[in-house]
Amino acid sequence: MQKFAVFTGSCQSLPVVQYLLQTNQLACVVLVDGQPNPDLMQLQQWLKQQNITTLPYSKNGDDALLSQLDRLAVNCGVVYLFRHKIRKPLMQYFNGELMNIHPSPLPEYRGPQPLYWQLRNGETLTKLTMHQVTQELDCGDIACDVEIDIHPFDTIQCLYQKTSQALLHLISQYCELKQNNQLALCKQTTEYTKLAPALQPSDLVVNWSTCNTSDIVNMAKAGNLDRFCAQLIFRQSTFQLLQASKVECVLKGITPGTIIELGLKSGLIVKTHDGAVKLDILGATQGCFDGYRFALLFGLEPGLVFDNDVAVNSR
Amino acid sequence: MEKQQAEHGPVLDYAEPRVDELLKHSIRTQLESLLKAKLTTGQRQQVLQKSFTDAMTLVLSDTKIEHSTLLKAFEAMYDQAVQSMALAQLSEELLTKQYVSASGLIMSPHNCKHTIKDVYRIQGYARGLDRAIHSKLKHNDSVTILYPACGPFAPLLLPLLSYYKESKKFTNKQVKVILVDVHPGAILALTQLVEDLQLSEYILRIEEADATEYKPSESIDILVLEAMQHGFTKEGQLSIAKHLVQFLTIDGLMIPQNVSVRGMMVVGETEFNQQWKQAQYSHSLNVNNEAQQDRVELGEILSINKSTLLNMQELELQDGVKVIPASKIKLPSGVKDMGKRILAIYAHIDTFADEGVEQYDSGVTHPRPDMTFYIDAKPKDIEHTHFVAHSGDMVQFYYQLSGLPGFVPVKL
Ligand SMILES: C[S@@+](CC[C@H](N)C(=O)[O-])C[C@H]1O[C@@H](n2cnc3c(N)ncnc32)[C@H](O)[C@@H]1O
């Protein structure tokens, strides 16, 4: 008989919790240790309504948690959107039965921001991967996975939603394999090309001298309406870029970042290295606007150039 | 319809022109006064024509006119011109469309409309043109003038034509004009303005065409052109002139007869700030002696006239960009504060005879600081593609004929 503990801090894990609850395999939910946020509070409230046992995780040590898990006879664990690195005692407690869910085709995109970087690199397919928790993050053997198709227009919010739907398939697949004793853990291949590191502020700024058209289009998608929103700099002011599209351009000798066209129908178009990009939707503290209206309101005109950073020229 | 209303007294026969919201917003005062005045079309046209001839009478006068008087006259001309533009009923699309073409920036009519207030540029051109037309008509019965990239108001010529018509100085038999602009919005506004000014008799054609490709069927006696921004950048003046100069008659005139583009190393604060602390307005007569003496002149970088245009060699760079070799300049040595100075490029325009537009007379002759050019100094951030040189170096300037033309320095 499997008794699961789910380690999480977000409502996005609910499909897993619900599935385990309905199949009578849920023992408890272990909640992150940290400042409450709306997502976490909503999760707590829901768990309370469902009379689900919750255990607090402590940054300071696992002893208390371990004895409580033991008391509940927990023998399996699933970790998803849990901000802490699992320590050795907890790993030993589960003896290989603690799984983490990572939204990437591992070993590609190991790290804290897999969905963001996959969008940014223009990937068209991803996976939700269930793998063993090991000392080294995102490196454990793979139990099973579910493919997720990435639409060319998907934003990060779209992917959050899609992964949430795929979660149910993943957890049910995992449990069935386990019940039927068909689970075969598979080592991750040693070769990989891309990582998903934490984001630095400079990662979010569109640098016209280094980014090509698809980079900019993808940055906008990857950050859309998120705290990782892509940023544009114009005359020392920062704006958000929420959506951009590639357009053809044959002009030569124009510095990337130069606005080359503005029109009601054609929109706001900026030269890039390898063509041009239409800035479809822009955000500022004043609101969200299409490129055309934004340009007319804030004085952006063909012939003017976006900056690459906020450095002030002091001469 | 128009007549009927006129019979019932002064009725506003265009009471509710369908003016685009954006235009309405930017010319609200002019529209309000238009509505308040309750003029008939004929009366409005008269006021418009008068404002144009008044401005030209001042500009062509040989006695010195107060700056404020000129300003007022040009402001009146602008007010009337934008009312005419409002009646041309440009769609928002046509009003605001602006883009970089292969040969230069194509400004929207919305942004172009202000150039008719540029007093001393129009003065320098109108006076030069007037003298050029006079000199041509001394030996010829008529003169054909081509004005490419004329914009929605063709301000270098239409006021002068208004003045000729009103003063009966020259008739449509003597002066024939071809107006060319690539922007359909400019063409619409221009057509309305020519009609409102009742100048159609002088106008051979209004052509919607790219001036770098346009081929006039008649030979041209005078080519009048102003399509540049400060530092001789951004707009297609050179490409347009280079293409159209071939259609001039042997003794045809180009107005401006010469544009001399010069470079200097200045202390930004002195040149652009201190110099103007006491001045009432920006003009070559108001420059400050000390500031002028503080400049380190680099000399002429390029001169554009009929003969240099006919001899210009285009080079094509690897990336397909065309350039024209300009001057080779030896950077001066022994200037102590060279590292603190910035390059500024400015144009001096000789329209005709001794008429012209000097530095600071207009936005187009305003020196343009170039923050990417460093002598004896290191750029603050290494990411940008800056030009770095030392005192005494030889620098070859090129003029890049791209969608945003301008100078490119190369160290020899
Ligand atoms: C600054 S405005 C008007 C300039 C005008 N000479 C004046 O004094 O106001 C520029 C105008 O030039 C036109 N223009 C620029 N490049 C052109 C080209 N290559 N062919 C035709 N028109 C052009 C634009 O469409 C715009 O209406």
Image: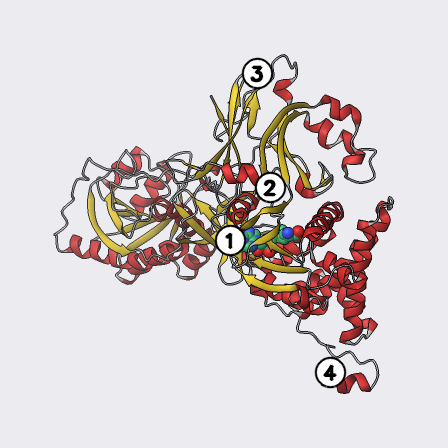
Secondary structure at badge 2 equals: loop
| Same chain shared by disc 4 and disc 3 | yes
Q: Position of residue A306 (x, y in %)?
A: 53, 43
* Callout 4 amino acid: Glu
Mark 3 Cβ and ligand 1 under 8 Å apart = no
Secondary structure at badge 4 equals: helix
C-alpha span from label 4 to label 2: 51 Å
Callout 4 touching callout 3 (CB < 8 Å): no
Position of residue A19 relative to residue B293, above or below, is below
Callout 2 touching callout 1 (CB < 8 Å): no
Secondary structure at badge 3 equals: loop
Observer-side mark, 3 or 2, equals 3
The residue indicated by pointer 1 is A261
Nearest to the observer: residue A69 or residue A315 = A315
The residue indicated by pointer 3 is B391
Assess disc 1: are there few (<14), some (14-19) or many (≥20) residues with their C-alpha within 10 Å of its C-alpha: many
C-alpha span from label 3 to label 1: 39 Å
The residue indicated by pointer 2 is A235
Q: Position of residue B264 (x, y in %)?
A: 64, 26
Q: Tell me which numbered mark, 4 or 3, is placed earlier along the sequence.
A: 4
Chain letter belonging to callout 1: A
Assess disc 3: are there few (<14), some (14-19) or many (≥20) residues with their C-alpha within 10 Å of its C-alpha: some
Q: Tell me which numbered mark, 2 or 1, is placed earlier along the sequence.
A: 2
* Callout 3 amino acid: Ser
Assess disc 2: are there few (<14), some (14-19) or many (≥20) residues with their C-alpha within 10 Å of its C-alpha: few
Nearest to the observer: residue B182 or residue B253 = B253
The residue indicated by pointer 4 is B2
